[in-house]
Amino acid sequence: MKAQILTDMPIGELNDLLQSERDRLVKMKMSHAVSPLENPMQIKFARKTVARIMTELSRRNISK
């Protein structure tokens, strides 16, 4: 997910997206522990997406 998309989203949608991405990341980690994922790099990309969303939220909180 690109940073430009995140800057255009309202805070409520960012919070919802953060929660869904965190849930997705946890599910991927659990399924990878049981049986290896076809593409384990998906975990890395999901973790980076969560970090991007959290960075955007903190940037907005600081600028208030």
Image (cartoon, rainbow, N blue to C red):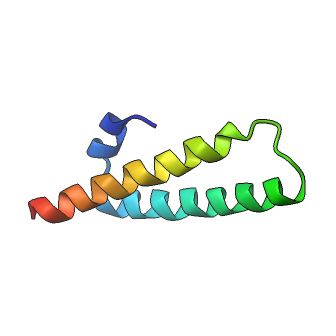
Count of picture labels: 0
Q: Could one spot residue 10 in this view of the protein?
A: no
Residue 18 in the image: x percent, y percent? Answer: 47, 60
Q: Position of residue 49 (x, y in %)?
A: 48, 47
Q: Observer-nearest residue: 11 or 34? A: 34
Q: Is residue 9 above or below residue 16?
A: above
Residue at image location 40% in from the left, 64% down from the top = 15
Residue at screen point 67% across, 38% down? 41
Q: Residue at x 88, y 59 (%)?
A: 34
Residue 21 as seen in the image, left or right of residue 34: left
Question: Which residue in the rendered view is the most extreme toward the right?
Answer: 35
Residue at (37%, 58%) from the top-left corner?
54
Q: Residue furthest left?
A: 64
Asked whether residue 48 appears in the rendered view, the answer is yes
Is 3 displayed left or right of 19 in the figure? Answer: left
Image-based side of 63 in relation to 14, left or right? left
The answer to which image quadrant residue 25 occupies is bottom right
- The quadrant holding residue 40 is top right
x, y percent for residue 22: 56, 62
Image: 37 above or below 20: above
39 displayed left or right of 46? right
The image quadrant where one finds the C terminus is bottom left
| 50 lies above or below 8 | below
